[in-house]
Image (spheres, grey):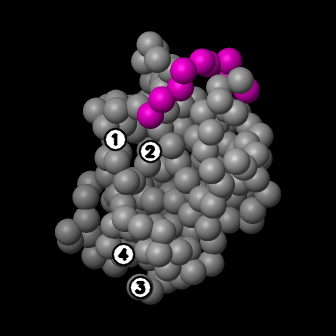
């Protein structure tokens, strides 16, 4: 794996959703670094990607309430444990569960393994509420996927908060997750 500045030189073999991500970031003047890799299906592979990027990639979880009337994208540190009870009380939503792959595709144009804040650019009707663990906001950089699981990006957290989110029209809600047993 190598670390590159910006988008790939050649779009061959890249999915349209990935190219749209680079186009969108470039249109906003957001600088980013990128590495390409095989899908990370274990912690060892994730740790290798983190080392190349010099940042811990965020854990991004796509959640919904039991009635499937509210959807949430939760960004939290990749090394923190997720407990539904801890989050449910903060957002007044009992019985949170993982949303289906179909809903992930419908609302974010993302498939399992590639969930990312970048998918919010595809949520034109603002059906998804962004939840960000406060610890993510303390880091200088955010690590995320460009809507595919075969590349990862390193982007300044301030650029996500000050440029990207206002552009896609999503107001984040900050949550506090302890993530301990």
C-alpha span from label 1 to label 4: 20 Å
- The single residue placed furthest to the front in the displayed view is 181
Question: On the image, numbered disc 1 is attached to which residue?
Answer: 109
SS class, disc 4:
loop
Do tag 2 and tag 1 residues touch (Cβ < 8 Å)? yes
Instruction: Give the SS element for disc 2.
Output: helix
Mark 4 or mark 2, which is nearer to you? 4
Percent from the top left, x then y, of residue 153? 51, 67
The picture places residue 141, in percent across and down from the top left corner, at 68, 65
Does residue 42 show up magenta in the picture? no
- The magenta segment is 90-98
Chain-order first, disc 3 or disc 1: 3
Q: Nearer the viewer, residue 12 or 140?
A: 140
Q: Which residue position is annotated with label 4?
A: 37
67 versus 120 height, above or below = above
Discs 3, 1 touching: Cβ within 8 Å: no
Quadrant location, the N terminus: bottom left
Judging by the rendered image, the residue that carries numbered circle 2 is: 119
Residue name at image x 33 percent, y 67 percent: 39
In primary-sequence order, the first of circles 2 and 1 is 1
Q: Is residue 127 above or below residue 111?
A: above
């Amino acid at each position: 794996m190598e670390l590159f500045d910006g988008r790939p030189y050649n779009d061959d073999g890249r999915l349209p959703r990935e190219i749209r991500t680079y186009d969108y970031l470039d249109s906003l003047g957001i600088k980013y670094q990128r590495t390409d890799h095989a899908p990370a299906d274990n912690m060892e592979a994730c740790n290798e990607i983190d080392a190349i990027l010099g940042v811990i990639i965020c854990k991004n979880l796509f959640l919904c309430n039991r009635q499937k009337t509210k959807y949430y994208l939760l960004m939290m540190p990749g090394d923190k444990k997720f407990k539904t009870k801890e989050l449910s009380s903060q957002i007044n939503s009992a019985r949170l569960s993982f949303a289906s792959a179909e809903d992930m595709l419908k609302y974010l144009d993302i498939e399992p393994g590639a969930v990312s804040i970048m998918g919010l650019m595809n949520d034109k009707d603002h059906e998804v509420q962004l939840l960000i663990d406060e610890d993510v906001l303390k880091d200088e950089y955010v690590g995320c996927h460009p809507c595919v699981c075969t590349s990862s990006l390193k982007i300044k957290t301030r650029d996500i908060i000050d440029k990207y989110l206002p552009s896609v029209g999503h107001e984040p809600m900050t949550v506090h997750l302890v993530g301990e047993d």
